[in-house]
Image (cartoon, rainbow, N blue to C red):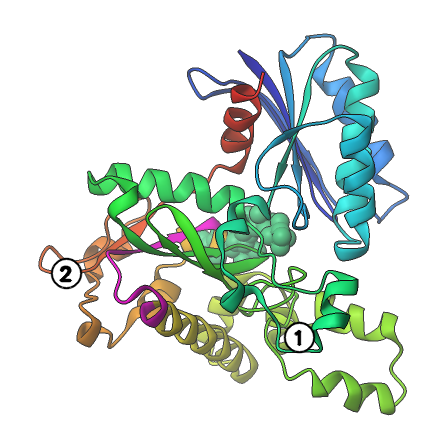
């Protein structure tokens, strides 16, 4: 079965044509910098459909970032599902409208081919109320859908299954902490294959320090800056685009931060330390949540490539049975990076959201 996958983000659209049975990627590409140079999502989709040519996929899979409480699994797109995704745009204004545009363009270009929405939030619908409830007025929360939803779920699903394969143990017996460290970054506690807690919340802003997003802050900072004259749009731009590594070190790329650390640049050193401190705090929290852990898994751009981030994140955690092997950790592409005598395994597992989307889409048709 041939799947066409559209992974539409706030500033880029990645696409792939792949053979679901073999997992082989046939063709693919990325349109970046949407919003700049007069390129919009609609224009980007036209370019992609042109590059794809006339070939007819059997199924089309779409990454949809916010599925709210309604979508607990991948869903075939109907007009009614489109409307529901549109209604959820208020909770993910940077992502859902772009996802919807991709869906509409694909439905129009390939009449008769089923479209499947695969939600970032779906995997986290197993999280219980103690972890997903914010301690605010419950009537307000109810009226506005304010609760923790969590994101990167498609990545967590793919990576946790691969981790179980690598460990040679059934997923339903494993306690995993998975760290998805890309430009957007989050952590997830997975018990027996089910998400039990995650660091992102109502929106993809909460939790870890990211490329341009602050992660956790005191909400009082918003009032403080609001009283100083910042508008809602100013605050949104500050926390989503001018914070995280960008805010502290002047750029969102961990490679540049590491180069700055090597050059002795004080801002880069602080950015690295803040990033790692937050990461360690979440690892500690999830050790407590899970009652111990069988494996810690690193994935996405930073997690897969930055040996120094992995080393700093787990340094001095021998007390918890976590022992990294320095040589293994330094080798690119190695999958097990813990020492043979480490009670907790540490793994590097490259994520593949496109393949997971294709598989889930194919399974529905
Ligand atoms: N060799 C590397 N060392 C450190 N960080 C890296 C390396 N390669 C990529 N990265 C980081 O990975 C980030 C992108 O991760 P990725 O998972 O592709 O993010 P996204 O899908 O959110 O765009 C880059 O911003 C960069 O900071
Ligand atoms: C949900 C989210 O943060 O996605 P990304 O990492 O692609 O920005
Ligand atoms: Mg990503």
Seen at 72% across and 86% down, the residue is 221
Q: Residues within 10 Å of mark 2 (few under 14, many from 20)?
A: some
Residue 292 shown in magenta? yes
Instruction: Find the magenta span and give its range.
Output: 287-300
Residue 20 visible in the shown view: yes
User: Residue at the left extreme?
Assistant: 341
Left or right: residue 175 compared with residue 361: left
Question: Pointers 2 and 1 in contact (CB under 8 A)?
Answer: no
Q: Secondary structure at mark 2?
A: loop
Q: Could you tell me residue 307's position as x and y percent?
A: 35, 59
Residue 45 visible in the shown view: no
> Residue 317, relative to residue 346: is it above or below?
below
State which mark lies toward you, 2 or 1.
2
Q: Which mark, by number, is residue 67?
A: none
Q: Between disc 2 and disc 1, whose residue precedes?
A: 1
Residue toward you, 288 or 356: 288
Residue 246 shown in magenta? no
Ligand 1 has an atom within 8 Å of the beta carbon of the residue at disc 2: no
Where on the picture, by quarter, is residue 147? bottom right
Seen at 39% across and 73% down, the residue is 285
Q: Secondary structure at mark 1?
A: helix
Seen at 74% across and 48% down, the residue is 95
Q: Could you tell me residue 211's position as x and y percent?
A: 60, 63
Left or right: residue 37 compared with residue 266: right
Which residue in the structure is indicated by mark 1? 247
> Residue 336, relative to residue 149: is it above or below?
above
Which residue in the structure is indicated by mark 2? 343
Task: Give the alpha-carbon distance from disc 2 to disc 1, as whole Å.
Answer: 38 Å
């Amino acid at each position: 079965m041939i799947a066409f996958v559209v992974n539409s983000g706030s500033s880029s659209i990645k696409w792939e044509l792949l053979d679901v049975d073999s997992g082989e990627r046939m063709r693919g590409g990325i349109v970046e910098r949407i919003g700049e140079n007069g390129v919009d999502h609609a224009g980007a989709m036209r370019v992609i459909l042109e590059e794809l040519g006339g070939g007819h996929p059997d199924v089309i899979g779409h990454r949809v970032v916010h599925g709210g409480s309604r979508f607990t699994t991948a869903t075939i797109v109907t007009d009614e599902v489109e409307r529901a995704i549109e209604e959820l745009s208020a909770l993910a204004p940077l992502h859902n409208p772009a996802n919807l545009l991709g869906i509409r363009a694909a439905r129009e270009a390939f009449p008769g081919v089923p479209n499947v929405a695969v939600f970032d939030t779906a995997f986290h619908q197993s999280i219980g109320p103690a972890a997903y409830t914010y301690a605010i007025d419950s009537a307000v929360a109810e009226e506005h859908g304010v609760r923790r939803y969590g994101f990167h779920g498609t990545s967590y699903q793919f990576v946790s299954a691969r981790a179980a394969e690598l460990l040679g143990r059934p997923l339903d017996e494993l306690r995993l902490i998975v760290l998805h460290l890309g430009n957007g970054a989050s952590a997830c506690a997975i018990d027996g294959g089910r998400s039990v807690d995650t660091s992102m919340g109502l929106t993809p802003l909460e939790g870890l320090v990211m490329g341009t997003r602050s992660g956790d802050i005191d909400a009082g900072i918003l009032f403080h800056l609001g009283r100083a004259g910042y508008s809602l749009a100013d605050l949104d731009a500050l926390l989503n685009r001018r914070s995280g590594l960008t805010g502290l070190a002047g750029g969102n790329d961990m490679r540049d931060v590491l180069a700055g650390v090597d050059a002795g640049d004080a801002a880069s050193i602080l950015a690295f330390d803040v990033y790692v401190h937050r990461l360690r705090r979440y690892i500690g929290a999830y050790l407590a949540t899970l009652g111990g852990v069988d494996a810690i898994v690193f994935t996405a751009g930073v997690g897969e490539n930055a040996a120094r981030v992995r080393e700093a994140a787990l340094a001095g955690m021998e007390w918890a049975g976590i022992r990294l092997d320095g040589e293994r950790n330094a080798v690119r592409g190695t999958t097990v990076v813990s020492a043979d005598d480490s009670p907790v395994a540490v793994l590097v597992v490259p994520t593949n959201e496109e393949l997971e989307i294709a598989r889930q889409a194919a399974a529905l048709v």
